[in-house]
């Protein structure tokens, strides 16, 4: 029996489980929306909500020490091994310039995400069912922030219809008979 055992184990050792949850948390803070399995989303959701609450507490009206403290709390969980600034080489000139790393999510959390939720007390994320995963039938969901600017996903082209594919399964391999061009003899 698993009495008083709050977290899901995902059949992973603790270090791999923590890395998985940190990676999903980083992705959600970076892209505002992620596609993942239902159990992973349910495990990441409270972590992200606590980080947003911490970021709200360390907003612009907080004291300098409170802002520093909240940033350190967030950084301890999210970006402990990612540099805030990176060196970018100049094109024709020798040397480099120092720019903010676009994959460093702490400033994004404090400057973009937390201000959107200043008037909201909790419930910053939502889970939307997206169907079943093709390979193993795992329930997939979209975990996203509730308010704010919409994230525009890149459009994908429709895959070419096929008659039979690898191992006789439809979808992969030869093109459909109506789309196939027969060579002309002559």
Image (spheres, grey):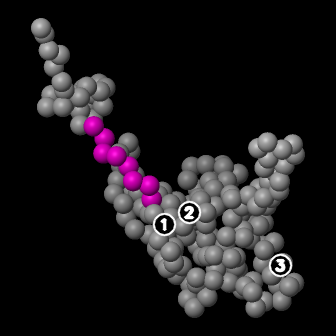
Which of 109/85 is in front?
85
* Residue to which mark 3 is pinned: 69
Q: Secondary structure at mark 3?
A: helix
Classify 44 as above or below 93: below
Name the element at disc 1: loop
Q: Quadrant of residue 51?
A: bottom right
Q: Which residue is mark 1?
A: 151
- Label 1 or label 2, whichever comes before in sequence order: 2
How far is mark 2 from mark 3, CA to CA? 25 Å
Q: Is residue 36 above or below residue 115?
A: above
> In the rendered structure, are the residues bearing label 3 and label 1 in contact, judged by CB atoms less than 8 Å apart?
no
Query: Could you tell me residue 28's position as x and y percent?
Result: 57, 64
Instruction: Give the camera-side residue of 116 and 65.
Output: 116
Q: Residue at x 64, y 61 (%)?
A: 26
Seen at 38% across and 49% down, the residue is: 156
Q: Is residue 106 left or right of residue 30?
A: right
Q: CA distance from mark 3 to mark 1?
A: 30 Å
Residue 81 or 6: which is nearer the viewer? Answer: 81
| Neighbour tally class for label 3: few under 14, some 14-19, many 20 plus, Cα within 10 Å | some
Of circles 1 and 2, the one toward us is 1
- Determine the residue located farthest toward the top in the rendered image: 186
**Residue hosting label 2:** 31
Tell me where residue 32 appears, x and y as whole percent. 54, 67
Q: Reply above or below: 100 against 166.
A: below
Residue 5 in view in this figure: no
Mark 1 in CB contact with mark 2 (< 8 angstroms): yes
Magenta region: which residues? 153-160
């Amino acid at each position: 029996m698993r009495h008083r055992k709050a977290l899901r184990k995902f059949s992973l050792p603790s270090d791999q489980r923590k890395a998985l949850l940190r990676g999903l948390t980083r992705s959600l803070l970076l892209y505002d929306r992620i596609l993942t399995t239902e159990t992973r989303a349910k495990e990441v959701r409270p972590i992200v909500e606590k980080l947003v609450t911490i970021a709200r507490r360390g907003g612009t009206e907080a004291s300098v020490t409170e802002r520093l403290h909240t940033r350190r709390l967030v950084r301890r969980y999210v970006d402990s091994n990612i540099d805030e600034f990176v060196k970018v080489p100049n094109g024709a000139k020798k040397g480099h310039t120092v720019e903010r790393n676009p994959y460093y999510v702490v400033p994004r959390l404090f400057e973009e995400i937390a201000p959107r939720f200043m008037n909201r007390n909790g419930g910053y994320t939502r889970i939307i069912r997206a169907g079943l995963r093709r390979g193993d039938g795992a329930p997939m969901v979209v975990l996203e922030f509730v308010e704010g600017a919409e994230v525009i996903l890149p459009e994908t082209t429709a895959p070419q219809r096929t008659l039979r594919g690898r191992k006789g399964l439809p979808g992969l391999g030869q093109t459909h008979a109506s789309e196939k061009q027969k060579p002309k003899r002559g």
